[in-house]
Amino acid sequence: MLSTHHNWHRSLQVFQLAPIKTASAALVIDVIDAKNKLKRGSAYVPLNDIQSQEVEKKMCQVILVPGSNLKDATERHVIHVQVQFQFSKVLPLKRELYRVFEEKRAVEVDITSLSLGRECATDWEWEGL
């Protein structure tokens, strides 16, 4: 969600940029006054700040363009972004596979324990019981 203290046009915009060969780049967001078709400022998100490959919420300061003629140019202007830098499509899948394999292993251990008359090693939350 893009928004500012001025309540300029609020909108949800989704972009996919590829390929990016380095993490030493930055995502640059230009803030445009749609009515007057003027650039009001820019915000930056360094890709190094979002290397977790998870969706992250960031609040970026908007650096105003000199001569923006905004009445409250001394105020701090921010833009809220939700961003994900996915430098590998394989890594998120591997993480999910490892999580599922770990859960499968826990289920198999508990099945063996129950078949031997022992207690479960995992405290499962059973639905509907």
Image: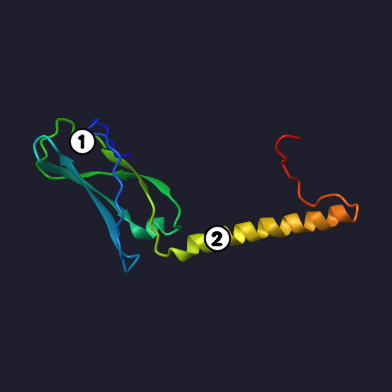
Q: Amino acid at mark 2?
A: Arg
Density class for disc 2 (Cα within 10 Å; few <14, some 14-19, many ≥20) is few
* Residue 103 figure quarter: bottom right
x and y percent of residue 128 in the render? Answer: 72, 34
Q: Eyeballing the image, is 37 above or below 19?
A: above
Q: Residue at x 89, y 52 (%)?
A: 118
What is the distance, in whole Å, between disc 2 and disc 1 at their CAs?
A: 45 Å
* 87 on left or right of 102: left
Q: Residue at x 12, y 44 (%)?
A: 66
Q: Which residue is disc 2 drawn over?
A: 95
x and y percent of residue 98 in the render? Answer: 60, 61
* Residue 33 figure quarter: top left
Eye-nearest disc, 2 or 1: 2
Q: Which residue is disc 1 drawn over?
A: 74
Nearest to N terminus: mark 2 or mark 1: 1
Q: Eyeballing the image, is 120 above or below 108?
A: above
Query: Which residue is situated farthest in the right direction here?
Result: 117
x and y percent of residue 97 in the render? Answer: 58, 61
Task: Report the quarter where the N terminus lies.
Answer: top left
Label 2 secondary element: helix
